[in-house]
């Protein structure tokens, strides 16, 4: 028996399409619900590429996409950077040649064999004129994805027993302050799409409300303003009006990848990672000093007697987690009943145990772990299965609820009848 899960954006062979996906990897389900074994393709420039339209060539990189045609004339004293040329590909593959020399300028890295260079005013992930390669890690210093504050929850989640109702202050100057996290956000974003590098370099150039220390948010920062209980858009529209329903770039790279970056879809509040060069997406800037380079040694306080009754206290989010979970799986209703049961309270101690919200569950995802194994701190949470774990957050108006798939660290929307493991919180 196959289980289908519908999403607004599916990732299949690195191609982005709208439709559904199936646990049978050979079957693609189109937007109309009809099954097809044909893999769709996307045309770009003069070459058909999977999700990477080809553009003008800049300088070669150490690794990068398949080379396209030569780019426009180079800029004097800036080899490898092309004026007004489209972004080149950045998937790993054969290297391209550099752009042709411009009047009074140097050739675009013709001796460097490697990735496709970026066009326009951006350098691009594929390469620099000197043959080096710019990656998401280099441009963000590989900031880890840790919440440094209590996590705000949607009204629907708080009504169901979660703490920290989301609350915002409109500063009346084009910015909004999150009263729970302390983060200050760009209030209105243009209905325009950008490459990831344009986003990560664009925020520091923003001057808004007298502040010039804006940056692209990490995944957990961006996800903290999601309202998973509503859709189109999945954000508080009173404080964030005219939010385009789109994928939004974060600054968080996918561990183990030189080209993939995490994004949040503000149509329904889902997360996934995509190629940073193409297609372009939206972005919203943030300011504060809330992101640490890693989870500090004192972040988790583990209380354990060596049995399955241990707990983990997160000193940043102030949540206490069930440390070890069994292999048992539950439907969504069963999961909520299990966490609120006297049996769990008796084994873990105290009362108030419940199924975590989707945003709470995302705070224990460790994005520094490569996908495939469980993306969670293995010392604090040993023997965690690389499976989806239920959250208490439903998608309003549907028979679906949110979970986090710890094999990839992404959010997952599933039918409430599906059986998943559970990790309780209080």
Image (cartoon, grey):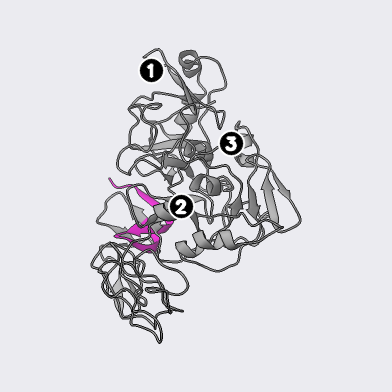
Res. 6 visible in picture: no
Distance of mark 3 from mark 1, alpha carbons?
A: 28 Å
Instruction: Assess whether residue 18 is covered by the magenta stretch.
Output: yes
Distance of mark 2 from mark 1, alpha carbons?
A: 38 Å
Query: What's the mark number on residue 149?
Result: 3
Numbered disc in front, either 2 or 1: 2
The residue wearing badge 2 is: 140
Report the number of numbered marks: 3
The relative height of residue 374 versus residue 382 in the rendered view (above or below) is: below
- Residue drawn at x 30%, y 38% is 373
Query: What's the mark number on residue 308?
Result: 1
Left or right position of 321 against 328: right
Residue 276 location, quadrant: bottom left
Tell me residue 231's x, y (percent).
56, 53
Q: Earlier in the sequence, mark 2 or mark 1?
A: 2
Left or right position of 94 against 4: left
Tell me which segment is drawn in magenta. Answer: 1-20
């Amino acid at each position: 028996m196959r289980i289908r899960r519908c999403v607004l954006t599916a990732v299949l062979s690195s191609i982005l399409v709208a439709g559904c996906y199936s646990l049978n990897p050979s079957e693609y389900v189109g937007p109309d619900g009809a099954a097809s074994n044909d893999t769709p393709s996307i045309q770009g420039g003069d070459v058909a590429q999977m999700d990477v339209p080809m553009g003008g060539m800049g300088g070669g990189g150490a690794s990068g996409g398949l080379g396209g045609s030569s780019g426009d004339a180079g800029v004097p004293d800036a080899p490898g950077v092309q004026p007004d040329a489209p972004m080149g590909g950045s998937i790993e593959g054969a290297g391209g040649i550099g752009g042709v020399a411009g009047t009074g300028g140097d050739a675009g890295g013709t001796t460097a064999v490697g990735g496709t260079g970026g066009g326009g005013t951006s350098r691009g992930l594929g390469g620099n004129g000197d043959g080096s390669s710019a990656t998401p890690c280099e441009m963000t210093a590989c900031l880890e994805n840790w919440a440094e504050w209590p996590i705000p929850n949607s009204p629907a989640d708080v009504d169901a027993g979660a703490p920290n109702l989301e609350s915002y202050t409109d500063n009346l100057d084009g910015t909004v302050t999150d009263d729970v996290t302390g983060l200050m956000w760009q209030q209105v974003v243009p209905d325009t799409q950008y490459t990831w590098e344009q986003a990560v370099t664009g925020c520091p150039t923003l001057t808004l409300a007298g502040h010039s220390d804006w940056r692209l948010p990490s995944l957990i920062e961006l996800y903290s303003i999601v309202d998973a209980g509503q859709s189109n858009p999945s954000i508080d529209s009173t404080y964030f009006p005219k939010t385009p329903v789109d994928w939004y770039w974060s600054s968080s790279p996918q561990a183990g990848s030189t080209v993939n970056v995490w994004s949040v879809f503000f149509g329904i509040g889902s997360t996934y990672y995509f190629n940073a060069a193409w297609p372009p997406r939206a972005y919203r800037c943030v300011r504060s000093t809330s992101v640490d380079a890693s989870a500090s040694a004192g972040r988790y306080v583990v209380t354990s007697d060596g049995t399955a009754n241990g707990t983990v206290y997160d000193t940043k989010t102030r949540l206490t987690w069930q440390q070890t979970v069994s292999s048992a799986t539950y439907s969504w209703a069963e999961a909520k009943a299990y966490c609120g049961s006297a049996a769990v309270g008796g084994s873990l101690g105290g009362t108030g145990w419940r199924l975590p919200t989707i945003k709470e569950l995302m705070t224990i995802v460790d994005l520094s772990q490569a996908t495939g194994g469980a993306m969670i701190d293995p010392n604090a949470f040993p023997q965690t299965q690389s499976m989806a774990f239920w959250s208490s957050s439903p998608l309003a108006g549907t028979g679906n609820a949110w979970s986090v798939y710890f094999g990839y660290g992404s959010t997952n929307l599933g039918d409430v009848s599906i059986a998943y493991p559970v990790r309780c919180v209080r």
